[in-house]
Image (cartoon, rainbow, N blue to C red):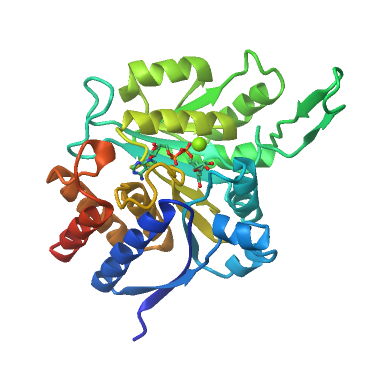
Amino acid sequence: TQARTYTVDLIAGDGIGQEVVPAATRVVDALADRHGFRVAWRERQWGSAYFFEHGRMMPVDGIEILSDGDAILLGAVGHPELPDHETLWGLLIPIRREFLQYINLRPVRVLPGVVSPLRGVDDLDIVVVRENVEGEYSAVGGRVYRGAAEEFALQEAVFTRTGVTRVARYAAELAASRSGSLTSATKSNGIIHSMPFWDEVVSSVVEDYDGVELKSVLVDALAAALVLRPHDFDVIVASNLFGDILSDLIAALAGSIGIAPSANINPPRDHPSMFEPIHGSAPDIAGKGIANPTGQLWSASLMLDHLGEPAAAAGLMSAIDEVMAAGIRTADLGGSAGTEDFTAAVLRAVASS
Ligand code: NAI
Ligand code: MG
């Protein structure tokens, strides 16, 4: 019989993306062998190098090219000689929006042997569910009278009933499958139209879920509480901007930005979903072979889960846990292992599982 086959577009992108993405494909291929499936990788040489040659981050029909794949595994984009809004709005944001990847899932856990910058935190386990296609990140608005004293900038936030309902439902389902605790990040005291609307829609959605307890917390107080009492939180649902900020804060609590993964999910599966570490292209360490591949590997594990290979996904996480617990760590975690040493250790752990 034919092995299950998944078609995955690979965008290694810029900087350390070129180092951590190959680590992930080797580990996924090893897991595929053991679990009886195959991944057909389609490598896309897109990103800043493509930009310097063609004046854009990906081909004009880039979205169409990706549309028949099962998933996208992305490294990072960003180059010191290009403005960051060009690289972001030229590749990442169009993919998220065109493929309606309206959930940005960001799980955070303190891995074995990793020391949190917070005292007494060694068992943090939080998932941020961030709205990923509307909210404060919008192209609606403009700048008028550039350079004049009368100049102004207007930036509209867009919150729709459909958009808030679907992210709240996703978060409530996730909370129901975990501890039942759901925290909604709000700012309905200061932002008087969109945030009361967010609160109303979220609470009416969550009413349908027995066993899910919703707390709405003002985002400024929530930032403080996450540092002071991180164990009080399990699943957090937040708008695009609040989710972006909170998830970086929570990832930092877990020790290094090099660890944290993310999934950009299109839940109805009408389009491919995209999996990427939360870190960027790290030009300061690119080309040195010292990048931590864990965020990329964990993202690949989220991808395997999404593709319907939960055993391989769990196998990948146990291999990472085992290697971390054995004290093999990259420089960002105070160790001396290079990207290759760490990856080789993960491959050995997969082979002996
Ligand atoms: P960054 O995440 O690339 O780096 C921040 C710091 O963390 C650096 O000191 C870096 O060396 C370190 N770091 C990051 N990932 C690491 C890893 N895997 N192992 C070890 N150390 C790691 O963020 P920065 O410097 O703000 O941005 C650099 C470029 O990346 C910019 O052009 C930015 O726009 C882009 N960027 C792209 C993202 C994406 O593609 N999703 C996300 C964030 C930034
Ligand atoms: Mg961010």
Q: Which residue is at 40% across, 51% downward?
A: 16
Horizontal and vertical percent for residue 177? 37, 42
Question: Where does the C terminus fall, quadrant-wise?
Answer: bottom left
Task: Name which quarter of the figure residue 188 lies in.
Answer: top right
| 1 is higher (above) or lower (below) than 315 | below
| 33 is higher (above) or lower (below) than 352 | below
| 210 is higher (above) or lower (below) than 61 | above
- Does any portion of residue 180 appear in the rendered image? no
- In the displayed structure image, the side of residue 351 where residue 22 appears, left or right: right
- Does any portion of residue 81 appear in the rendered image? yes
In depth, the one of 275 and 190 nearer the eye is 275
Task: Name which quarter of the figure residue 136 lies in.
Answer: top right
Question: Where does the N terminus fall, quadrant-wise?
Answer: bottom left
Horizontal and vertical percent for residue 197? 67, 26
Horizontal and vertical percent for residue 318? 21, 52
Q: Which residue is at 28% across, 38% downward?
A: 332
Task: Name which quarter of the figure residue 26 lies in.
Answer: bottom left
